[in-house]
Image: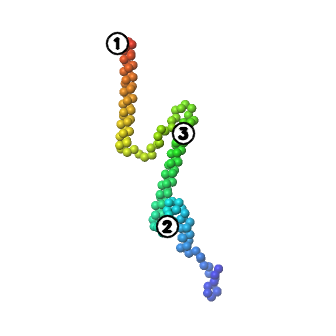
Amino acid sequence: METDISGDIPFQINEESPQSQYGKYLDDVCPYYMMYGMTWDEFWFGSLDKLGVYWQKYQFEIEKRNQELWLQGIYVGKAVSVVLDTKRQAKYPEKPYRLTELTEAEKEAEQRRMINEFREALNSRKAAWDARQKQGVDANGC
């Protein structure tokens, strides 16, 4: 407690002005924004508009990491199912799962591949049918 010049009226000096409280807050949050990827100079001398961009970038990184861990869990689950499968029906993926959409050219190539596979399957079944019919005709003598 301090007194004024006359010594009659006591008054209290608030040593923390609002500006110094704001500075203390910035001191507290600076490490967080540095964790988000902002440099010390950018935080203290750059535009405050960048704070939101760095925070959003960090949120995207968290989401990306979450997706990576989720996908890793799928691969681990597949591996465990292959090991525990006594009938040997479970298969581990031969190639990584695709994370992006197919381009139009890739979609068309995939369609052509599926059509060709279907055509080959039909042709082999037709050939087997024809062979069975020929054997039946030859066996009957007709």
**Crowd rating for badge 3 (residues with CA inside 10 Å; few <14, some 14–19, many 20+):** some
Residue 86 point in image, percent of width and height:
57, 32
**Crowd rating for badge 1 (residues with CA inside 10 Å; few <14, some 14–19, many 20+):** few
The residue drawn where x is 54% and y is 62% is 32
Amino acid type at mark 1: Cys
The residue drawn where x is 38% and y is 35% is 114
Residue 58 point in image, percent of width and height:
49, 57
132, above or below 118, in the image: above
**Crowd rating for badge 2 (residues with CA inside 10 Å; few <14, some 14–19, many 20+):** few
The residue indicated by pointer 3 is: 79
Marking on residue 142: 1
Residue farthest toward the bottom in the current orientation of the protein:
6
49, above or below 65, in the image: below
Distance between the alpha carbons at the discs numbered 3 and 2: 47 Å
- Cβ atoms at labels 3 and 1 below 8 Å apart: no
Marking on residue 41: 2
SS class, disc 2: helix
- Scheme of image coloration: rainbow
Q: Left or right: where does residue 105 sit relative to residue 6?
A: left
Which numbered disc, 3 or 1, marks the residue that appears first in the sequence?
Answer: 3
Amino acid type at mark 3: Ala
Q: Left or right: where does residue 94 sit relative to residue 137?
A: right
